[in-house]
Amino acid sequence: MTKVAFLGLGVMGYPMAGHLAAAGHEVTVYNRTTSKSEAWVAQHGGSFKATPAEAAKDAEIVFACVGNDDDLRSVCVGETGAFAGMDAGTIFVDHTTVSAKVTNELYAVGQSEGIQYVDAPISGGQAGAENGVLSVMCGGDLDAYQSAEPIMGVYSRICRRIGESGAGQKTKMCNQIAIAGLVQGLSEALHFAEKAGLNGRDVVEVISQGAAGSWQMANRYETMIDDHFEHGFAVDWMRKDLGICLSTADETGASLPVTALVDQFYKDVQKMGGGRWDTSSLFKRLRESG
């Protein structure tokens, strides 16, 4: 049993922290909205604290899953930040999808205070978090990763160190770039089928068994056809992630023409009032465009 802290109890963090508790670890949680912490403790046991620093005190590993770069900085640094409560030699694992810039910044701050830092963004959505089958892509020092990996294993299907600090975040960018193109392609295929008078379900039953098959096709086509988008990974979050991808592409010299185009399509969805819709709502944009 390891004494751990978990910072951030959103749709991903709440079940992830629950898996840690179910595995027998001693878990202390922190959430900006205290009622979430109270509900988690009522369900899973453990304890909660009012600040990240208090939650991190005496923990061997501190996990975080928050919203964006600014949220991550706020739970890490400052008088009430986690780093202030952590001892030298302990490990901070960040599951938030953020920029490689803030990752490298916090890695350096951690090093200066004797804290090991692992960037470990996740993929698999809310269902993956609830079922403990996330994909975790990691960057950071090998010894820190090796210490944290067995504990991350309780909520992951695969957990892999890709390289040094920032490599995990850059791998997550690859993940989001690939998803953007896949969802747009699936949306266009279903839109074409609809306009051509074909039964979309029959079409997908056939093409999903061949080279066109994907996770997005298998898990999203039915809800897309049914015009149901109140689930899954929100458009607002995807635009945040794609913004990170496009900014990093400018820095590295990578060319992302399709990603840039799909980002604008998601902007259209936001204008339709769909900021909290699932990312598969790209199909709704096509359907309503006539």
Image: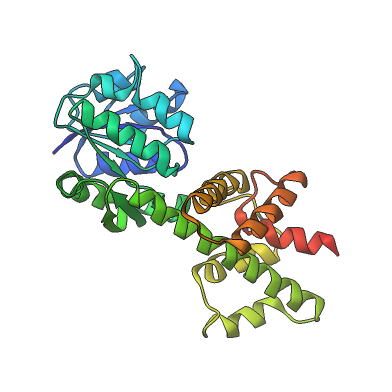
Q: x%, y% of residue 144? A: 18, 43
Q: Along the line of sight, which residue is nearer the eye, 61 or 79?
A: 79
Quadrant of the frame with the N terminus: top left
Quadrant of the frame with the C terminus: bottom right
Q: x%, y% of residue 156? A: 31, 55
Q: Along the line of sight, which residue is nearer the eye, 80 or 157?
A: 80
Tell which residue pokes out farthest to the top in this image.
79
Residue in the picture at 61% in, 55% down: 279
Residue in the picture at 20% in, 47% down: 145
Q: Quadrant of residue 50?
A: top left
Left or right: 146 in relation to 138? left
**In the rendered image, the vertical position of residue 275 relative to residue 249, given as above or below:** above
Tell which residue pokes out farthest to the right in this image.
290
**In the rendered image, the vertical position of residue 186 relative to residue 32, given as above or below:** below
Residue 47 visible from this viewpoint: yes
**In the rendered image, the vertical position of residue 217 relative to residue 79, given as above or below:** below
Q: Along the line of sight, which residue is nearer the eye, 251 or 36?
A: 251
Residue in the picture at 77% in, 63% down: 286
Q: x%, y% of residue 276? A: 64, 44
Q: Quadrant of residue 17?
A: top left
Residue 27 visible from this viewpoint: no
How are the colours assigned in the image? rainbow
Q: x%, y% of residue 26? A: 20, 33
Left or right: 277 in relation to 232? right
